Amino acid sequence: MFRLNQIFIMTAISLLALVGCNNAEKSSTQPSSTASPAAETKTTSTGKADFKGLLSVVSHTKTAVEAGNFAKAKEEFGKFESFWSKVEDGVKVKSPHAYKAIEDNSDEITGGLKASAPNKQKVLVALQSLNKSIITAAKP
């Protein structure tokens, strides 16, 4: 009888160990919640088109600034956020440095275009920097 109790106890301990190991394996194979699937989807499904849209906004804004038409430049740059909002989460995850550069440049351009007398050269430099940052962020 004593021997039978030992066998039951050993069997119970073994089963508990197996169940515990199986649960640990399942949790390690599940996808990590730190990288948002939505962010990954945003950069892959519409990313190329949205990056092209961003570059187009920068190009049109630059053309308007070079012509001295700051009202048109402000209107063109107003379209930036609609494209940026679609890819920014993915960029933030993939390249925090490029994300910060794009955010800083877009803030600088927005502020420069809102000024009563915009500094043409300063806005053009920020647009050029923004263009480079977008190209960097768009690379796979």
Image (cartoon, rainbow, N blue to C red):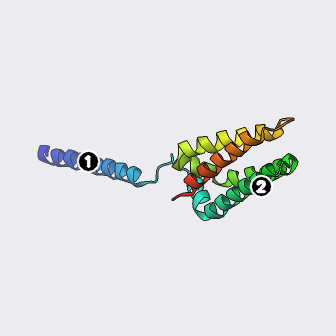
The image shows residue 48 at horizontal and vertical percentages of: 62, 63
Bin the neighbour count of mark 2 within 10 Å (Cα to Cα): few under 14, some 14-19, many 20 and up.
Answer: some
Q: Is residue 65 visible?
A: yes
Bin the neighbour count of mark 1 within 10 Å (Cα to Cα): few under 14, some 14-19, many 20 and up.
Answer: few
User: Looking at the picture, which amino acid does disc 2 mark?
Assistant: Thr
Residue identified by numbered label 2: 63
Label 1 SS: helix
Q: Is residue 82 above or below residue 114?
A: below
CA gap, disc 2 and disc 1? 76 Å
Q: Which residue is located at x 86 percent, y 49 percent?
A: 69
Q: Which residue is located at x 64 percent, y 58 percent?
A: 51
Is 67 in front, or is 44?
67
Q: Which residue is located at x 72 percent, y 53 percent?
A: 58
Label 2 SS: helix
Q: Is 132 placed left or right of 9 in the picture?
A: right
Residue identified by numbered label 1: 12
Q: If you read the primary sequence from the N terminus, does the residue marked by circle 2 or circle 1 appear first?
A: 1
Q: Is residue 28 above or below residue 107?
A: below
Residue ranking furthest to the top: 116
Q: Is residue 78 visible?
A: no
* Front tag of 2 and 1: 2
Is 82 in front, or is 138?
138
Residue ranking furthest to the left: 3
Residue 108 picture quarter: top right
Total numbered circles:
2
The image shows residue 53 at horizontal and vertical percentages of: 70, 60
- Verify CB contact (< 8 Å) between mark 2 and mark 1: no
The image shows residue 85 at horizontal and vertical percentages of: 69, 51
The image shows residue 90 at horizontal and vertical percentages of: 58, 52
Q: Is residue 47 above or below residue 132?
A: below
Q: Which residue is located at x 77 percent, y 37 percent?
A: 111
User: Looking at the picture, which amino acid does disc 1 mark?
Assistant: Ala
